[in-house]
Image (spheres, helix red, strand yellow):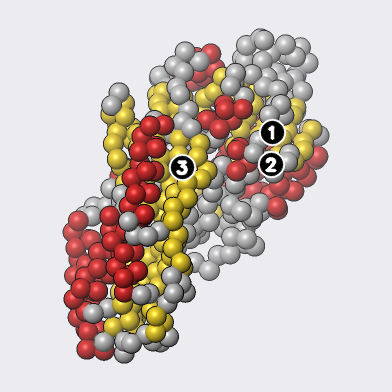
Amino acid sequence: MSEIANLKPEAIWRNFDALTQVPRPSGHVEKVQQFLLDFAKKAGVEAFQDPAGNIVMRKPATPGMENRKTVLMQAHMDMVPQKAPDSKHNFETDPIETHIEDGWVYANHTTLGSDDGIGVATIMGIMESKDLKHGPLEALITRDEETGMYGANDLPEGELNSDILLNLDSETWGKFVIGSAGGIDITANLEYKEVENDQETAVKVTLKGLRGGHSGLEINEGRANANKEMVRLVRKAIAECSARLVSWQGGNMRNAIPFKAEVVLALPKAEVEHLEKLVKEQKELIEDEFKTIENNVEFFTENVEAPKNLVPEEIQDNLIDAIYACHNGVVRMIPVYPDVVETSSNLAIININEGKASFKILARSSREDMKEYIATQLESCFSMAGMKTELSGSYGGWDPNPDSEILGLLKKVYKEQNNQEAIVQVDHAGLECSVILGKYPNLDVVSLGPTLRSPHTASERFEIATAEPFWKLMTQVLEEIPEK
């Protein structure tokens, strides 16, 4: 066990420490599924894996509390696999290494997995406890939330029996979320026939060290998008250095702001020095434009072997125009909640290589009409470049219910325990609540959690001091759940 296993409350930290030893990147959750089934068997609670790959657990009520409403605790099992450029971590095989620094738990140059490992660990602690008092409990630990909410989208109807849903995937202690944005995946593809390289040399240009971040929680913080910053350089290189595009790779997760992009350019030898000058100037421009936001920008060139083929010039120009024109960032805020983003898009992933170009975007909005608007805007942009656009993975927003009974109980207990009022808010980040509500519309829903910061980045961290009051709130609320 690591040093975090000895933190308080032991029920959360011991289970989270065990979870960090199980590889669980999105798309590779087989090990954590088995881990959770083994845990449930040892804890003596009913558990099964449903057809969607979710793990469902059930625990009977404490004697005398059988007439309480049934509570469904929900979290997702997968984590975003992001790492610092110098990390050799393999998310499919290696455990997460944790350490404590200034009151926070960090990983070793990778994502920590507290999103949503802390939610899962909390569920585990409650399910294994022999002394907590509660009514009937269910747990739903969903598969692959981070890449498309697949577990929630494929959740069978009629599988759950609960009255109340406590989603444990929020990230600020003292805030109860009662609504969230919907989202849609936009993928633009183009196949092309490469042409023979007629240039003398080739250079790889790398932009890295940007902060990146969660495209729902941090899209409004003005962070640089590596793909959008790289296209400015590439356009200049084509115009001023007679450069030709060979390949492009930027970003790796649809819901993460890309912090790194690499392109390979072919160009005349005589223009290499000019290109290096442009890269230096563009780095200085980024540092100036994003002063106080981006502090570790790296932008550099290195010579590579000249390729056999290039992107055809007309295709190249169309793709560069599409990247330049593609909307990225906030579209607008919610008029009645002016501090909350209503609609946004994140140009997350670009891959151009060997006759194929692919752009991947996650657009979010708390309004269906605006979600359709931004999706159509992006589709129009890519259509002008001759790309075929596919819309998929659409999920609706979660409409807030300020009169929620479980919200009232959470606010009451929070005030009793902390001697202050909780904050009730609507989030721009997508939560599985909206998808689950689509299948179980009578659930009374609130999302909550302790504090973590910079999810989806190698700077992800969890604030230790918020774990104990979160556990205390959860256990008292479960004890005070009203009767049916």
| Residue type at numbered disc 2 | Ala
Q: Badges 2 and 1: C-beta atoms under 8 Å apart?
A: yes
**How far, Cα to Cα, is label 1 from label 3?**
21 Å
Taking depth in this image into account, of 198 and 110 the one nearest to the observer is 198
Image spot of residue 151 (x, y percent): 63, 41
Along the horizontal axis of the image, is 119 left or right of 229?
A: right
Count the marks: 3
Instruction: Give the crowd class for mark 2: few <14, some 14-19, many >=20 residues within 10 Å.
Output: some
Of 132 and 317, the residue lying toward us: 317
Disc 1 or 3, which lies upstream in sequence? 1
| Residue ID for mark 3 | 184
Q: Amino acid at mark 3?
A: Ile
Above or below 234: residue 113: above
- Where residue 212 appears, as percent x and y from the top left, is 38, 54
Q: Which residue is mark 2?
A: 52
**Residue 7 seen in this snapshot:** no
